[in-house]
Image: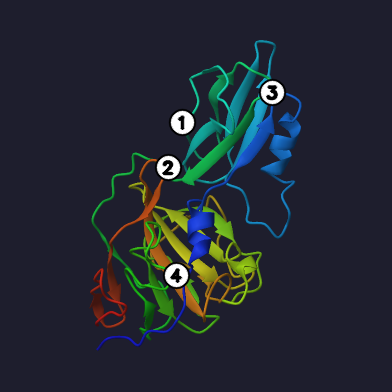
Amino acid sequence: MPARPTPSGLSAWLGRFLAMAVAIAIAIAALPAAAAAASDGAGAGAGERDPAPLARLEIVDRGAGPEAWAENLLSGPIEVMLRATGAAPPAEPALPARATVPARARVLVSRIGRADAQLVLEVVPGHPGARPLDGEYAWPLGSRTLRVSQGWGGTFSHRDDENRHAVDFATPEGTPVLAAREGVVMQVEDRFGSGGLGSSDDTGRANFVRILHNDGTMALYAHLAPAGARVRAGERVRRGQRIATSGNTGYSGGPHLHFAVQANRGLRLVSLPFRMFGPGGILRFTDAAVGVEE
């Protein structure tokens, strides 16, 4: 029978943090004097209460003019776009310039011809060439209880590209969260301790684990408990392995696990339809439904 809906979800967090991701990470630099500030602002210098950055913009001048390098801080590929906030300076390649950066690597994005340019680095997790393979995902919770509080196309917070095919599984805090598919842990955030719908301050502060699959897609497990991660970035996990503990952090109306399969579609994070085997058999999600049948 259909599961009873309850109000919960990611809302603005995924729009802001996951086209992160999240996931748009931004670094701004004035050339060349603020090169150090660009590195600090996008890396360790960021406040502890801010979501961790995806990348760092570094300006290097070896005597032939400023070079803009993107450093990937994740254990999986990212796509970046470097652009100017005002008039675009002479550059090779011309701005806006795109690049794909492998896990934990640095890539030269562009050589800049004017030292006073103001630059912005936009970042999206995942490789734009991902080719999703059809497969069945395992039940992601260490619980036999199935209750969906928001499904595909849910009106509360599942109407944008990042979340359209996400599912919110209502579950008590402390429930084990399991990997629905094998892969490599690309990103972990578990420093945040609060959640709720009353303050916009919580929209960017949901704990999550992102796992990269062999076809370039990524599974997102969000609203996890504080210090609830059981894996670290770069670790390979198997299907069914415990990766975290469920919680109620970030913009959330109640304890639940937000699960989505996402792919980078050219500097745009998109959620994908998926098939899943639940406690009672195959789960059938539809774009119009808020619940599921088992």
Query: Is residue 100 visible to the viewer in this orientation of the structure?
Result: yes
- Nearer to us: label 3 or label 1: 3
Q: Which mark is residue 169?
A: none
- Name the amino acid type tagged 3: Asp
Distance between the Cα atoms at labels 2 and 3? Answer: 26 Å
Distance between the Cα atoms at labels 3 and 1? Answer: 21 Å
List the residue tagged with mark 3: 116
Mark 4 nearby-residue class (10 Å; few <14, some 14–19, many ≥20): many
Q: Earlier in the sequence, mark 3 or mark 1?
A: 1
List the residue tagged with mark 1: 98
State whether residue 163 is above or below residue 44.
Answer: below
Q: Earlier in the sequence, mark 2 or mark 3?
A: 3
Q: Earlier in the sequence, mark 2 or mark 4?
A: 4
State whether residue 39 is above or below residue 108.
Answer: below
Q: Is residue 163 left or right of residue 134?
A: right
- Nearer to us: label 2 or label 3: 3
Furthest-top residue in this view: 64
- Nearer to us: label 1 or label 4: 1
Residue under the point 65% across and 37% down? 28
- Nearer to us: label 3 or label 4: 3
Residue under the point 68% across and 20% down? 115
Question: Do the numbered discs 1 and 4 sit on residues whose CB atoms are within 8 Å?
Answer: no
Distance between the Cα atoms at labels 1 and 4? Answer: 30 Å
- Name the amino acid type tagged 4: His
List the residue tagged with mark 4: 258
Q: Disc 1 on helix, strand or loop?
A: strand
Q: Is residue 238 left or right of residue 35?
A: left
Q: Disc 4 on helix, strand or loop?
A: strand
List the residue tagged with mark 2: 267
